[in-house]
Image (cartoon, rainbow, N blue to C red):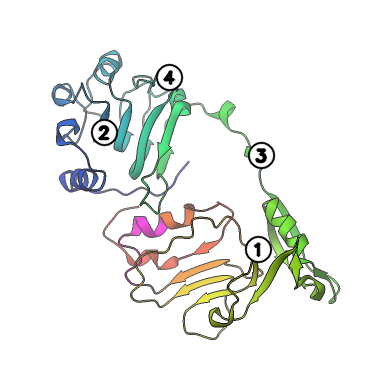
Amino acid sequence: MFFTLKISSDFSKDLKTIVSTKDCDWKCTFNYSEVTSKTIEYFPRKCEDVCAILTFNSNTDVAESELKKVFKQMHYLIGGLRIENSNITSLSFFTLLKVYDTFNFICDTFGLSIVNNSLLEDIAILQNFQFWVTSHSAYECPFQISNNTKLDTTDNLYDVLFGPLFINLENLHPDFCLTFKELLFFYEQRVIFNNIHAKYCPESKKRINKQKLCEIRNLDSLDDDCNYLFGDLVIDSFEDSHPAILVRSNKYLKQLKLPNLKHVISRNKDAVVIEDNPVLFSSNMECLMYRITYATNLRINNEGCGEFDSFMT
């Protein structure tokens, strides 16, 4: 499993980011870049909510039984969790809330990384983790789990809801068309089209289930009482061929949230294209993470992420 993680060599700066954006109490903040027998003495043992970038690595020389005692009162971790190049065998040293049998991890800032742990065998407790993002965050939690040679996940991998359904519509009669209601059904079933050589049936461009259906021609002429929209949504000043959603050349655009966007059915290779918006993303991580903030079958092209070089990926 691999999603892009933000990696910075400036631990103090990263921790200050967490404290300032998550309203942390310094008394409940672990101000050390790694967990060792020396630094663990400064862990805020009496705090239920702890702000930290907990890092377990080759320098971690604390027994897992001791870690369980130290973390006994912590039920909320705010920040990041990194288990990298360590000798840890299990993550069972986290304590679950008795009422809900969960551990809460506010993880949108630095996420979870479990990498290069040759002795790690047990991460079952992650099933009881509740992964949270703060209300103002546009991103989900970044994850990286790789190269843990003893970690056997074979029995735990399965298709959620049997996986997506792929349909291919091509080389059809030129009069072949789909009603909007049929497209709505495909959307509800989360169908992914390899090809969709079809057009809307003319009779579908009226009302669906007694709700108004509108074609997007331009935003100025769009009625404000539409329940359904079809067509291409373009936010720029160009007049060429577009994907379904195109956000381009908006030099003052600082935030792009589509919180309820779940699926886009488009004949274009890239359903969503985001390009040339110079202040939209502040880092390579933010740009790349935008792609996985939405449904995994949504084809988002924002190749401009490569322009950022302040973070390793």
Instruction: State left or right for residue 120 relative to residue 297.
Output: left
- Numbered disc 3: secondary structure: helix
Q: Compare marks 2 and 3 and give the one earlier in the sequence.
A: 2
**Is the residue 130 above or below the residue 291 in the image?**
above
Sequence order check, earlier mark of 3 and 4 = 4
Give the amino acid type for the residue marked by disc 2 in the picture: Thr
Name which residue lies at 33% across and 26% down.
Answer: 75
Residue furthest bottom as drawn: 239
Of discs 2 and 3, which sits in the foreground?
3
Kind of residue at disc 4: Val
How far apart marks 3 and 1 lie (CA) works out to: 20 Å
**Which disc is residue 55 wearing?**
2
Q: Which residue is mark 3?
A: 161
Give the side of residue 165 with respect to residue 239, left or right: right
Distance of label 2 from label 1 (alpha carbons): 42 Å
Which residue in the protein does label 4 denote?
99
Q: Position of residue 39 (x, y in %)?
A: 15, 26
Which residue is at a point 59% across and 78% down the rendered structure image? 222
- Which of labels 3 and 4 is toward the front? 4
On the image, numbered disc 1 is attached to which residue? 265
Residues in magenta? 278-288
Q: Residue at x 72, y 59 (%)?
A: 184
Residue plotted at (42% across, 64% down): 256
